[in-house]
Image: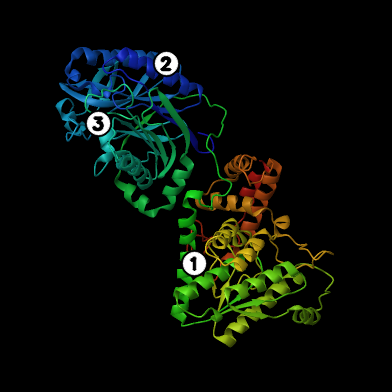
Amino acid sequence: MKYGFITVAATVPAVKVADTDYNLREIENQIAQAEGRGVEIICFPELSLTGYSCQDLFREQILLDKAEEALIQLLDFTRMLDVISIVGLPVSVNGILLNCAAVIQHGTVLGIIPKTYLPNYNEFYEKRWFASSQDLRPTVIYLAGSPVTVSSEPKIFSTMDGVKFGVEICEDVWAPIPPSNNLALAGADIIFNLSASNDLIGKHAYLRSLLAQQSARTMSGYVYASCGFGESTQDVVYGGNAMIFENGRLLCEGERFSLTSQMHLCQIDVERLRAERRTNTTYITAQSHATACQIDTCPVEQRDFRLMRDISPWPFIPSDAEMKDSCEEILNIQVAGLIKRLTHTGCKRVIIGISGGLDSTLALLVCVRAFDRMQLDRSGIVGVTMPGFGTTDRTHDNAVSLMMSLGVTSREINISKSVIQHFEDIGHDISVHDVTYENSQARERTQILMDLSNELGALVIGTGDLSELALGWATYNGDHMSMYGVNAGVPKTLIRYLVHYVATNGMDEQSRATLLDIIDTPISPELIPADEQGNIKQKTEDLVGPYELHDFFLYYILRFGFRPAKVFMMACRAFDGSHLGAGPYDEETIKHWLTTFYRRFFNQQFKRSCLPDGPKVGSVSLSPRGDWRMPSDASAAIWLAECEGL
């Protein structure tokens, strides 16, 4: 395991019913391929050495003997291989027959897992041939020439890297309380399921949903391999399902009804799963009574790591298929939060500073939706433009145009005279464009909004976003402060996406044109005078770094607690130029801005410790009352040291 990833495979070999020699060759071929491709654990279907659909042939001693002979040959074949293989076969124990999974590595049977729940309804008749693990007393048998304990005791296998996995068989996962529940609670990171599920209309969709839910509920990786071509089609057809999940998310899926053997592999992020479990107190409470026998696998040589999975540069942005539903849900959360605050306070007016930038634009759109839902006149939304030393015509005109087309009340208050007077009062040289020069303007704007709110009996709506809060890119007691921050849970990359969604869905032509131009405008606080052509001179991303990089860092650092080396590795993959519209950034650039992120994130915590209220909309939040509680004087030394070594 490197960076927390382990490579697994779900394999569906072609079979011939009751032909153990043929089945063994197919299995050996798949194992050899898996070893060559760096697979660490490979899972085969239920009863893969004999075929699942042997029916009464399972009563024939010769078939049972041939299955054991095939296992002996497979052990010999794997003697020099590192890959852990999980195969299915019938095993006879003291006069009863068990449907088992054998976990093998380096020519050794590490453990035998008998099936617990035997389907005996509709097209299934397993109790005709097999007994359940619950019918079994712990027994030592000689299997493939070696003593093996066969029992109903749950078993967890541990690799030398500390990855833990358990095994269940087909119907087990369909049971009200699957064995994988206990296995996961006892510490298994990954569950492997050897299955033989026939295909019916609608069954595949139900199966996929069932496995996704089980993976999500147990916060585990779930690897599922089911019988395919070659099984008997006397009465049913086996489509050959191969699926791999990670905490409910489908990582890869095989081709159903394939006429040839297939192997599907991917990497499961065990570190991510463990981070989820550590955070979830419900899971922690549930696991306290779970037990399982622990079995160590064989030591193996470490291989060079190559990340196989694709990583999106924009973890906060929904997929195209989810776009409409996700955008509407985010906007509804923001709107519902604001409506509750307005209802509670009895306010029918809001004050919002409109700069012509993305953040204030989204906040204004949320206010408009909230007022429409409450059937309040939009004139109760007071948008205030406050031009200063760095305001450009483009942002000013966009702000005015948007307020006009949306039908809100527009006011303009130029802050230049007030700030100049303030500079005179404190003795600051106006030609020195330092942090005092910038922050005085931000605080003047906030004072105006707060005083107007008193005058009009209105709430000041905050516009600052999650990305700015993470970086501390906000003036303390300036734009840092409001009476309700509707964007507090929305990162910058997602704000751009949301504004584009609103612009292209149901907006009038003037508003749409303005919104699209706002999206194309460089992000800037506009606190430094424009250049000679009147264009924005102070670009935020030149100063603190690209927001798409910072949002990527923010997601993986806060959501899963990944260390700098892992975040760096993932960012290098995500921004390698393979994703249209992202980056690319070289390793030196990513390292520079990752270091900047950590430095600013630690140094600016004091601003997050006293945030105004605002709604959480996604899995990451920096509210000091909710998801993120951090001392303002914590040291960033160990994080920055690792960044230096990248």
Q: Is residue 482 above or below residue 523?
A: below
Residue 281 on image: x %, y %: 39, 54
Of the 4 image quadrants, the one containing the C terminus is top right
Circle number at residue 168? none
Reading the image, the residue beneath label 3 is 115
Reading the image, the residue beneath label 1 is 334
Query: The residue under label 1 is which amino acid type?
Result: Gln
Q: Dot 1 surroundings within 10 Å: few (below 14), some, or many (20 or more)?
A: many
**Viewer-closest of 209 and 171:** 209
Which is closer to the viewer, label 2 or label 1? 1
Q: Is residue 28 above or below residue 287?
A: above
Residue 67 on image: x %, y %: 27, 16
- First in residue order: circle 2 vs circle 1: 2
Query: The residue under label 2 is which amino acid type?
Result: Arg
Q: Which residue appears farthest toward the bottom when viewing the image?
A: 455
Which is closer to the viewer, label 1 or label 3? 1
What's the CA distance linking mark 2 and mark 1?
Answer: 59 Å
Q: Is residue 97 above or below residue 21?
A: below
Q: Is 232 displayed left or right of 327 in the figure?
A: left
What's the CA distance linking mark 1 and mark 3?
Answer: 49 Å
Query: The residue under label 3 is which amino acid type?
Result: Lys
What kind of element bears circle 2?
Answer: loop
Which is closer to the viewer, label 2 or label 3? 3
What is the image's colouring?
A: rainbow
